[in-house]
Image (cartoon, rainbow, N blue to C red):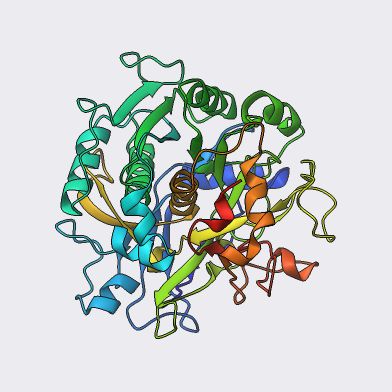
Amino acid sequence: MRTTPTHSAGRRRWHRIGSAATATAALLLTGLTTAAHADAAQASPSKVTWTRSCALPRHPGEMACNALRVTGGRTAFQQQHGISPKAADATSPSGYGPADLRAAYGLTSAATSNGSGRTIAIVDAYDDPNAESDLAAYRSHYGLPACTTANGCFKKVGQTGSTTSLPAPNSGWAAEISLDLDMASAVCPNCHITLVEAKSATMTNLGTAVNEAVSLGAKYVSNSYGGGESSSDATYDSTYFNHPGVAITVSAGDAGYGAEYPAASRYVTSVGGTSLTASSTTRGWTESVWSTSSTEGTGSGCSAYDTKPAWQTDTGCARRTIADVSAVADPATGVSVYDTYGADGQGWATYGGTSASAPIIAAVYALAGTPSSGSYPAKFPYANTSALNDVTSGSNGTCATSYFCTARTGYDGPTGWGTPQGLGAFTG
């Protein structure tokens, strides 16, 4: 189920460099953050509308979260269960819950048995004052074990590790935080969670938070943000993301075809996005590339700056190709989230964006077990491609080299090697 947002003709994709930065700044001044879906050729009978949670970057080195909140229409979950189209109704879930995600990705048994003693770190910018209470509401609703500060499961710190000196609150990033915490919980309910909040949305501060997450012992670190590539990426790589033995996942982006950083880092698992719907197949689910228009959908592409990791062997791109793997990200086939802070925080909502897929994959790594010492877990799916659902349909834009933007059998940019089919592709 796909929908296509319409935008001002002057809109430019925020992660482009050069003249695109000027266009982005102009759009920010107008407050253009809501996508209205109106392409009749692709629209469903009850089309989904959504809004971007975080402001777009104003300056080089700034990052935007990739969370998209559904504001109306009828989601795939509602259609599957015959629920009336009230996607903006905050009183009850309107997107996929833990049981759906585990069933779709062959994780039902593992989610029950695995994860105890393992810590997933969520790295985001700014503070969510309601993070712990909102997480408790989500987990209680779905019957997941409590994860609190009191029982040692949940911990919230600033980018230097302080539990008391936290950054300023931010409504948009609080929504992102709720999405990330809920997805980690949905897939790995027995895992501990550490939320590390950067003091601002710059790569420097977010990178410092990544380092803090690792220093606190997390072996799985989820990052649901991205920005423009730059010549600074090599420095960022060595300073913030080179952590052998730690699975670091990063959203591929929500602006359609085109490369982002830090998804382009050679040390991370870059996570693309799919549309996920229930079906009568043996698996019970089908997936395609998430794309609502040429500038709205999962990110992918060939990096302009970042070195290709040794295990990535596609021949069309001499540098790093995005993505490695993927999971659900289409707002129209979105996930349920509970958030009560700020303008976005009205209770239950449905979210999409690759902000959903990155923590899902981080949690799959956590279910799979501790990465071997000295390993780069981004390599694991490349050695176990048969343990993934190959996504072979859909495109996220137009590109000169077809597989950069179009799904095919085997590896492609929008979905990488595919989506989880159990844990086999995430161990090593």
On the rendered structure, is 136 left or right of 62? left
Residue 22 appears in the rendering: no
Q: Residue at x 46, y 74 (%)?
A: 2
Would you place residue 277 above or below residue 31 in this image? below
Q: Determine which quarter of the picture holds residue 126.
A: top left
Q: Determine which quarter of the picture holds residue 178.
A: top left
- Decide which of 82, 220 is in the foreground and name it: 220
Task: Tell me the quarter of the image containing the N terminus.
Answer: bottom left
Q: Residue at x 60, y 75 (%)?
A: 394
Number of marks:
0
What percent of the width, then of the height, locates residue 374?
Answer: 66, 32
Q: Residue at x 49, y 40 (%)?
A: 222
- Decide which of 91, 45 is in the foreground and name it: 91
Would you place residue 50 above or below residue 177 in this image? below
Residue located farthest toward the left when viewing the structure as drawn: 91
On the rendered structure, is 58 left or right of 86? right
On the rendered structure, is 39 left or right of 289? left
Task: Tell me the quarter of the image containing the C terminus.
Answer: top right
Residue 170 appears in the rendering: yes
What percent of the width, then of the height, locates residue 226?
Answer: 57, 42
What percent of the width, then of the height, locates residue 349?
Answer: 27, 55
- Decide which of 255, 134 is in the foreground and name it: 134
Would you place residue 223 above or below residue 283 in this image? above
On the rendered structure, is 164 left or right of 340? right
- Decide which of 417, 201 is in the foreground and name it: 417
Would you place residue 398 above or below residue 23 in this image? below
What percent of the width, then of the height, locates residue 181?
Answer: 34, 42
